Image (tube, rainbow, N blue to C red):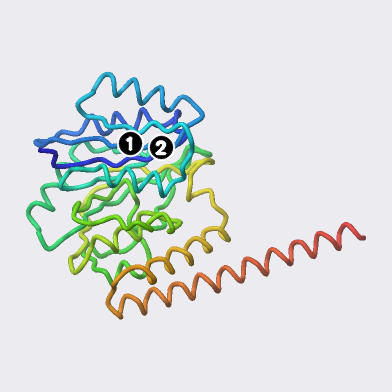
């Protein structure tokens, strides 16, 4: 029986993927795991590296090698639906794990605490452009126990730190959301809690090809507005959660308007310089 499925998305990660795969294989565990990877038609040597590992460890890997790029959310949905473990741990191909006991610690916690549906931990943020570790701007809360109301205020968990119970159904329209992880947590948490466990056990990379970290502020705000609208329109949530989500959407819309105004000011000033 597979206890843990590791869900992995890759696209043009040839410079990083070996570190991620080695982190999975170095886990010291007392249970069976599977590694489910969706490669979204990488144009570099990512698929060749994946095949190398798959040939060496055929009992551990299930890999989708795509010839045509289908997009992050369809790729994510297919990987999720293929996970057979009781728990799912996440790590994209450009991130990696640094603690060989990470999975065992998270499984031990969830096995002993039925009232919790998700657990996560702190991560190290590594900026590839300057080869330096940066301050974590997401996981700053001093608490270690959270609920769905906390989740409504924003996503405070880095993807490579998360493990959750595989007891949810991926909606048919899940691909309409521009972001996969945050709405997934709402689908999964129900009336249970989230626990932050001790330790920095993963590294989240910031690099020039990162899906989220390289987006402009304007695109991040647009994506945030869209994902909140998706959650509100498609999920049965307590009114307190819906109220907080509407509040957060309002904030994102105001920030988006400010970026638009700033953009038009820059264009206006540029034309003035050209005319002069």
Choose top left, top right, bottom left or bottom right for residue 140: bottom left
* Secondary structure under the numbered disc 2 in the rendered image: strand
Q: Quadrant of the C terminus?
A: bottom right
Which residue occupies 35% across, 30% down? 19
Residue 78 image position (x, y, % from top left): 33, 44
Q: Is 142 on the left-hand or right-hand side of 3? A: right
Q: Residue furthest right?
A: 276
Task: Between residue 166 and residue 199, name the one nearer to us.
Answer: 166
Choose top left, top right, bottom left or bottom right for residue 150: bottom left
Residue 223 image position (x, y, % from top left): 49, 60
Q: Residues within 10 Å of mark 1 (few under 14, many from 20)?
A: many
- According to the picture, the residue beneath numbered tag 2 turns out to be 10
Q: Residues within 10 Å of mark 2 (few under 14, many from 20)?
A: many
- According to the picture, the residue beneath numbered tag 1 turns out to be 37
| Residues at circles 2 and 1 in contact by the CB criterion of under 8 Å | yes
Identify the disc placed on residue 235. Answer: none
Residue 246 image position (x, y, % from top left): 42, 76
Which residue occupies 36% across, 27% down? 18
Task: Between residue 262 and residue 134, name the one nearer to us.
Answer: 262
Which residue occupies 41% across, 54% down? 175
Q: Quadrant of the N terminus?
A: top left
Choose top left, top right, bottom left or bottom right for residue 219: bottom right
């Amino acid at each position: 029986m597979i206890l843990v499925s590791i869900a992995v998305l890759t696209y043009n990660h040839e410079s990083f993927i070996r570190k991620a795969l080695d982190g999975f294989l170095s886990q010291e565990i007392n249970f069976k795991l599977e590694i489910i990877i969706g490669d979204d038609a990488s144009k570099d040597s990512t698929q060749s590296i994946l095949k190398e590992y798959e040939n060496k460890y055929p009992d551990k890997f299930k890999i989708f090698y795509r010839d045509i790029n289908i997009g992050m959310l369809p790729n994510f949905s297919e990987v999720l639906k293929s996970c057979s473990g009781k728990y799912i741990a996440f790590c994209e191909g450009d991130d990696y794990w640094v603690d060989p006991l990470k999975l065992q610690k998270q499984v031990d916690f969830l096995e002993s605490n039925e009232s919790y549906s998700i657990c996560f931990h702190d991560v190290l943020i590594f900026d590839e452009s300057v080869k330096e570790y940066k301050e974590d701007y997401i996981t700053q809360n001093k608490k270690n126990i959270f609920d769905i109301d906390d989740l409504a205020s924003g996503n405070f968990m880095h993807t490579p730190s998360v493990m959750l119970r595989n007891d949810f159904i991926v909606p048919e329209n899940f691909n309409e959301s521009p972001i996969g992880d945050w709405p997934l947590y709402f689908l999964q948490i129900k009336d249970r809690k989230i626990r932050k466990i001790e330790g920095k056990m993963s590294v989240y990379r910031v690099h020039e090809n990162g899906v989220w970290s390289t987006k402009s502020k304007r695109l991040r705000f647009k994506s945030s507005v869209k994902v909140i609208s998706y959650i509100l329109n498609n999920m049965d949530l307590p009114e307190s959660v819906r109220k907080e989500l509407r509040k957060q959407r309002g904030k994102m819309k105001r920030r988006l308007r400010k970026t638009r105004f700033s953009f038009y000011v820059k264009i206006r000033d540029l034309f003035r310089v050209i005319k002069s």
